Image: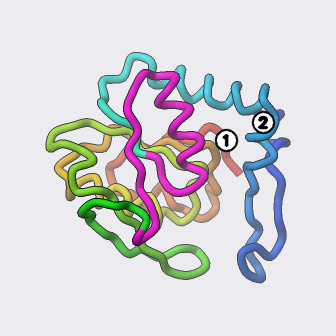
Amino acid sequence: MELLKQKIRDIQDFPKAGVVFKDITTLLRDASSFNRAVDLLGHRYLDWAFDLVVGVEARGFVVGAALAYKLNKGVVLVRKPGKLPYKTHSADYALEYGTDSLEIHQDAVEPGQRVLIVDDLLATGGTVGAVIDLVHRTGGQVVECAFLAELTFLGGREKLGDVPVHSLLQF
């Protein structure tokens, strides 16, 4: 795990002063590290009963799609407003450095389907909290939220209530 952590670089003062951004693009460009990360995440879910992987814009698409492929699951995209072409549900949320909104197609998850939400990073929990809300509004059930990395000092996990959380790397 330490080798994977070393592949993630820190960017000071991005996207605003005082924020240290964890840049996973350096891990993604290294084939063996990216493969290892997806294999480790995938191994956890090999025997889990769920229907879909929900990937969160934008880096969550990369990790989520690779994981869905490995697990032979479909992928649902949660995007910024105005990017999805069909009827959507929308949710606003707070980030550690501002506010934003996300959308999901109203028919992306069928009522009762079980989903795994995947994103690159868990920070304050605002983004994934909005995604959980969107999945619930479609009638879906969240089995777990999976992250490549987690900033544990921001306490995002605690803000998600009883939704299980798994992160491969902790900072």
Residue for badge 2: 4
Q: Residue at x 74, y 40 (%)?
A: 28
Q: Which mark is residue 46?
A: none
Q: Residue at x 76, y 73 (%)?
A: 14
Q: Amino acid at mark 1?
A: Leu
From the viewer's side, name the closer residue of 113 and 164. Answer: 113
154 magenta-colored: no
Q: Secondary structure at mark 1?
A: strand
- The image position of residue 71, as x and y in percent, is 46, 22
107 with respect to 35 (left or right): left
> Which image quarter: residue 37?
top right
Magenta stretch, residue numbers: 55-82
> Which image quarter: residue 6?
top right
Pointers 1 and 2 in contact (CB under 8 A)? yes
Q: Amino acid at mark 2?
A: Leu
Q: Is residue 146 above or below residue 22?
A: above
Q: Residue at x 62, y 29 (%)?
A: 38
106 with respect to 94 (left or right): left
Which tag, 1 or 2, sits closer to the chain's start?
2
**Number of marks drawn:** 2
Q: Which mark is residue 169?
A: 1
**10 Å neighbourhood of mark 1: few (<14), some, or many (≥20)?**
some
- The image position of residue 73, as x and y in percent, is 39, 27
